[in-house]
Image (cartoon, rainbow, N blue to C red):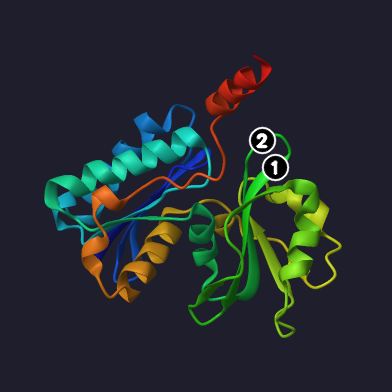
Amino acid sequence: MWILGFDSTASTVSAAVVKDGQPVATYSAESATSHSTTLLPAIERLLSASGITARELDLISCSAGPGSFTGVRIGVATAKGLAAPFNTPAIGVSSLEAMAYMYTEIPAYIFSALGARRGNVYAALFLSDGMGNILRLTDDDLLPITSAKEFIDSKVSNIEIKTLYIVGDTKNELREVCENCISVKVAASPSLLASPSGFGAALCGFRAFDSADDKSVFTEDSLMPIYLRKSQAERERDEKKQNL
């Protein structure tokens, strides 16, 4: 099964072509320009390097948020544009859950977080059993960075697993806040596994697709962005209305 997975929800653009669960070609880079000029050329190069065309893809899986509003919209629009011509099954996955899927072979807790400005993060907690399974422990949420330690300690319950990896673009700030967690020991995340990942998006999307009874629901029309808060423009508009 050929899967294209990609993530443009943070400053990094990441994409991967995956065949039967193994990466065939990958791309990851900090984007100095708009993701709109970076993502699609990267995907085209990956397909070419893999020796396939978009028509041959069996599934397209993109991180649909939370994250940068612009990045989320670009990712979802790209997935829709690639899926529509060939009716390719498409799925939007949580960017936070996609990062956790890089840890399927490591028994640990994973605290995935992306910057949300104003001292906040988009965050969720997951548990990997080390045998390929990722268990979601919380919904994706919007949290103050300062509350991360209490959030983690309140959710950790597995006494056999004591390691926590913090991943995402706020990992350094969060490690300082969480270094004295009561219930787990915070470990240094391997650099290759600490950022939003196209490979993780592919694995996460495949798991959802493979376990679904009705696979006909995975259409480009059903692929929608995942937002946890209003955009800055919407917030400013609401503030102006309140001040009238």
Give the tally of numbered discs.
Answer: 2
- Image quarter of the C terminus: top right
Can residue 59 be seen here? The reply is yes
User: Which residue is at the far top?
Assistant: 244
Q: Which residue is mark 1?
A: 120
Q: Residue at x 66, y 35 (%)?
A: 117
| 211 relative to 7 in the view: left or right | left
Residue 50 is situated, as x and y percent measured from the top left of the image, at 24, 56
Amino acid type, residue under disc 2 in the picture: Arg
Viewer-closest of 30 and 80: 80
Q: Residue at x 35, y 29 (%)?
A: 37
Q: Is residue 127 above or below residue 123?
A: below
Tag of residue 91: none
Residue 235 is situated, as x and y percent measured from the top left of the image, at 59, 28
* C-alpha separation, residue under disc 1 versus residue under disc 2: 6 Å
Disc 1 crowd rating (10 Å Cα; few below 14, some 14-19, many 20+) is some
Amino acid type, residue under disc 1 in the picture: Asn
Q: Residue at x 67, y 64 (%)?
A: 165
Q: Which residue is mark 2?
A: 117
The quarter holding residue 108 reads bottom right
Q: Dot 2: what SS?
A: loop
